[in-house]
Image (cartoon, coloured by chain):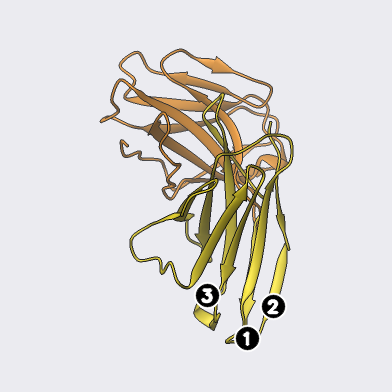
Chain colours: A orange, B yellow
Amino acid sequence: DAKTTQPTSMDCAEGRAANLPCNHSTISGNEYVYWYRQIHSQGPQYIIHGLKNNETNEMASLIITEDRKSSTLILPHATLRDTAVYYCIVRVVGNDMRFGAGTRLTVKP
Amino acid sequence: GAVVSQHPSWVICKSGTSVKIECRSLDFQATTMFWYRQFPKQSLMLMATSNEGSKATYEQGVEKDKFLINHASLTLSTLTVTSAHPEDSSFYICSARVVSTDTQYFGPGTRLTVL
């Protein structure tokens, strides 16, 4: 599976949109982009995934660039409860999830 | 989303004893489950993949005789840490895959402390 690069940490003001970038420049055509988050001392929570089209669900939006070399997870109205480590994972269908270091998002009042 | 549970949520044991952790998929059947370990301030590391009815596949460096995995049904996988030592103290997290969406869902984790 392709390697991903994420910023180590980010801050966001409560109520504002949080935009979390992920670089996956070596992604191949059959690899999906997945996002999970882990709140302190809990198991990872699935957020969203996509192949090449933008995706939206009740939690977030996923924007994938046309060349698929990068993506952005958008939390439209961040709350204090969104403070967590966010993981961007690229994988082929059927492969296991392997986690990098992720981005530590801190939502501030 | 699909729900995965783990039991116990935390356990403290003496060095040399064995500890069993259960992982259940509550609202779906999981032919494949995964076990991860997470040390403080580190990311999750995959330990092994278990397929229902067959032997688990362990990642390099993970001792299969120490970390016994059983996936006897489509909703239950167990991890037994045998002869636990203080260095086995960690946060153990299981995951189960929903075949139809090819998405993994994770349990809440089990914190093991070996004294």
Q: Residue at x 47, y 19 (%)?
A: A63
| Residue appearing at x 37%, y 57% in the figure | B59
In the displayed structure, B39 sits above or below B84; it is above
Image height of A34 relative to A103, above or below = above
Mark 1 surroundings: few (<14), some (14-19) or many (≥20) residues within 10 A: few
For disc 1, the marked residue is B115
* Numbered mark located on residue B12 in the image: 2
Residue sitting nearer the eye, A73 or A109 = A73
**Numbered-mark total:** 3
Does residue B39 appear in this view? Answer: no
Secondary structure type for disc 3: helix
- Numbered disc 1: secondary structure: loop
Q: Tell me what residue is drawn at x 70 percent, y 72 percent.
A: B11
Mark 2 is surrounded, within 10 Å at the Cα level, by few (under 14), some (14 to 19) or many (20 or more) other residues, namely few
Mark 2 vs mark 3: same chain? yes
Q: In which quarter of the image is the C terminus of chain A?
A: top right
Question: Which residue lies under the disc numbered 3?
Answer: B88
Q: Which amino acid does label 1 sit on?
A: Leu
